[in-house]
Amino acid sequence: MLTVERLTKRFAGGKGIEDVSFQVEKGEVFGFLGPNGAGKSTTIRHILGFMKPDAGRVTVQGMDSWQHQGQLQRVLGYLPGEIAFPEGMNGKAFLDFMAELQGCGNMARRGELIDRLQFDARTPIRKMSKGMKQKVGIVAAFMHAPPLIILDEPTSGLDPLMQKVFIDLVLEEKARGTTFLMSSHSFAEIERTCDRAAIIKQGRIVAVKDIHELQSMQRKIFEVTFVNEADAHAFAAARGDEAEIRKGHTVRVAVQGDYNAFLASILPYPVRNIDVFAQNLEDIFMNYYDQSEVLA
Ligand SMILES: Nc1ncnc2c1ncn2[C@@H]1O[C@H](COP(=O)(O)OP(=O)(O)OP(=O)(O)O)[C@@H](O)[C@H]1O
């Protein structure tokens, strides 16, 4: 659906993006993560056909983004981080303007989205809060039911309730086969919606990871409280270095992946309680942020 191939853009002072490559398959929600200034927006501008690459190319449904910029607007939905609205419009006028660009007049779909996001489209944009403007942007990106939607920091400005409405909307569209590229700083948002994510740093992709694989890399900390203190000691000794006795009866064990072996190792002893703590997925991502070498 979307192919970014060795995309390079060099700005003055050594800034820009270098050799950025990734592919997003149809129906996939692909996360795009990276610290400020890493090159997310520059990559997105190339995908939208707003910028001419120095080298490499982007294709959307086989169409070169730079060469077919006009046609792209019909197959793409785009929600920018900060929307620059034309002067003096209300929400409805802006959506009419966008519908014309998109070559689509699906009013039913538009109305449905407005109802769902709960805002009054007749409000002048200059009077709208950041969150309300964000909602207008979401309707504009989704209303023509494009096969590919690019979201730049989509939930910034939305309250937690609306963030949930938005995430549900993304998941529903994904179920219908819509493809998404979503830049975000919210790991929770990425974890809930994405299949894979690329991490970009200083203009280069440092990792492309399957979210489910990352979840399986997550270490779980089990705190097992045994009925008998002697059993706690025997269990800890059998688990070796990964186990630590917390209090007399309680043992803390870090487990990654092999839950069956872990469960089998507790089975011989009477257990009073088990607590589980998951390592934050964000911590796993942060390891990649901190690495300077290119991994993939
Ligand atoms: N038109 C331009 N001219 C010169 N330098 C630019 C231009 N656009 C971006 N840059 C520089 O290229 C680098 C990448 O910027 P970009 O906006 O793509 O980062 P980003 O990952 O989107 O950051 P943020 O999360 O802050 O939005 C930055 O150092 C930025 O200053």
Image (cartoon, rainbow, N blue to C red):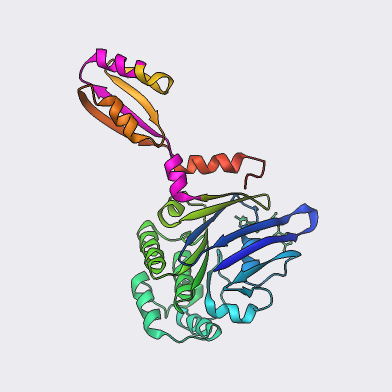
- Residue 46 vs 160, above or below: the answer is below
Which residue shows up at 54% across the image and 80% down it?
74
Location of residue 44 in the rendering, given as x and y in whole percent from the top left corner: 61, 64
Where residue 290 sits, quadrant-wise, is: top right
Location of residue 230 in the rendering, given as x and y in whole percent from the top left corner: 25, 12
Q: Is residue 13 left or right of residue 109?
A: right
Location of residue 209 in the rendering, given as x and y in whole percent from the top left corner: 52, 49
Location of residue 155 in the rendering, given as x and y in whole percent from the top left corner: 46, 60
Q: Is residue 275 left or right of residue 141?
A: left
Quadrant that contains the N terminus: bottom right
Q: Which residues are magenta?
A: 210-237
Where residue 57 sits, quadrant-wise, is: bottom right
Q: Is residue 63 left or right of residue 132?
A: right
Q: Is residue 171 left or right of residue 126?
A: left
Residue sitting nearer the eye, 267 or 13: 267
Q: Is 233 a magenta residue?
A: yes
Counting the numbered discs, the total is: 0
Which residue shows up at 30% across the image and 25% down it?
265
- Residue 170 vs 270, above or below: the answer is below
Name of the residue lying farthest toward the right? 12
Residue sitting nearer the eye, 204 or 117: 204
Residue 87 in view here: no
Residue sitting nearer the eye, 263 or 223: 263
Residue 242 in view here: yes
Name of the residue lying farthest toward the top? 230
Quadrant for ligand 1? bottom right
Q: Is 2 a magenta residue?
A: no
Residue sitting nearer the eye, 133 or 21: 21
- Residue 145 vs 228, above or below: the answer is below
